[in-house]
Image: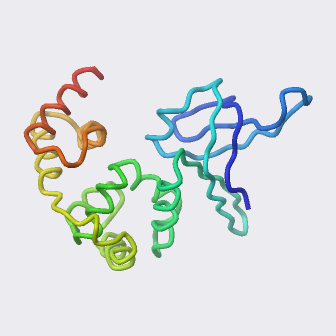
């Protein structure tokens, strides 16, 4: 089982990186194609060095690698794929919409509405996530996500897509009040245009 991979990023795309390992003095190393969530991917530079914690997904006809910059993200990814009906690609989509802290808060508080707003997550899958992970994420993460939902709706009403709004809100601390979240998100969105 591969636990981590460290090496030079020789190729970076929107969904994966190829990391070449091996000593520089060697004639050739091995390049691993590793699927990475968008947040981690944005921090990785092509041509630079990286170290990723790895989940190896093996099925009868598939051997895929999924990489994460921090171990907490890997652990949460593995919790998600443990839910029946959620595969690795679905788990990456879930990880791309909010911070782990926000997702854990939604799960521990039983916030079905928040989870069903994730693209590709229907009511039944969201209910499975709540049922199977609620005890595993812990009560210390409980809290209301109403401010997050209100900020998301405010940004959508200003003409931003749900994905643009979620990406901006992920960069703002979770304990920020709703008005400040909207102001900070607008600054972030203004810079990206």
Q: Residue at x 46, y 72 (%)?
A: 85
At a point 60% along the width and 52% down the height, the residue shown is 66
How many labels, in total? 0
Query: Where residue 192 sits in the image (x, y, percent)?
Result: 30, 23
Give the residue at the far front of this rendering: 140
Q: Is residue 90 left or right of residue 55?
A: left
- Determine whether, in the image, residue 97 is placed left or right of residue 89: left
> Could you tell me residue 113's position as x and y percent?
19, 64
Work out which residue is located at the far right of the displayed protein and give it. Answer: 27
Residue 186 shown left or right of residue 71 in the figure: left
Q: Using the image, determine if residue 46 lies above or below residue 175.
A: above
Assign the N terminus to one quadrant of the image.
bottom right
Q: What colour scheme was applied to this rendering of the protein?
A: rainbow
Query: Closer to the camera, 118 or 31?
Result: 31
Q: Horizontal and vertical percent for residue 48?
A: 63, 26
Image x and y of residue 73, in percent: 48, 54
Q: Nearer the viewer, residue 107 or 154?
A: 107
Q: Does residue 6 lie above or below 27 as drawn?
A: below
Name the quarter where the C terminus is drawn.
top left
Seen in the picture, residue 158 relative to 68 is either above or below; the reply is: above
In the image, taking residue 59 as reference, residue 77 lies left or right, namely: left
- Residue at 49% across / 60% down in the picture? 77
Relative to 143, residue 95 above or below:
above
The answer to which quarter of the image holds residue 182 is top left
Q: Residue at x 72, y 43 (%)?
A: 32
């Amino acid at each position: 089982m591969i636990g981590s991979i460290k090496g030079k990023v020789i190729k970076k795309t929107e969904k994966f990186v190829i990391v070449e390992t091996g000593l520089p003095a060697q004639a050739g190393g091995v390049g691993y194609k590793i699927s990475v969530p968008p947040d981690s991917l944005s921090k990785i530079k092509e041509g630079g060095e990286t170290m990723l914690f790895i989940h190896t997904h093996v099925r009868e006809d598939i051997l895929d690698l999924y990489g994460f910059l921090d171990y907490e993200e890997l652990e949460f990814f593995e919790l998600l794929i443990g839910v029946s009906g959620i595969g690795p690609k679905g788990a990456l989509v879930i990880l791309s919409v909010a911070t782990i802290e926000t997702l854990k808060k939604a799960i521990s508080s039983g916030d079905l509405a928040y989870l069903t707003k994730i693209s590709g997550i229907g009511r039944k899958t969201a209910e499975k996530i709540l049922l199977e992970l609620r005890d595993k994420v812990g009560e210390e993460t409980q809290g209301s996500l109403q401010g997050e939902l209100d900020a998301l709706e405010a940004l959508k009403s200003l003409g931003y897509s749900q994905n643009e709004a979620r990406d901006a809100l992920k960069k703002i601390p979770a304990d920020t009040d709703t008005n400040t979240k909207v102001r900070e998100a607008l600054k972030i969105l203004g810079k990206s245009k």
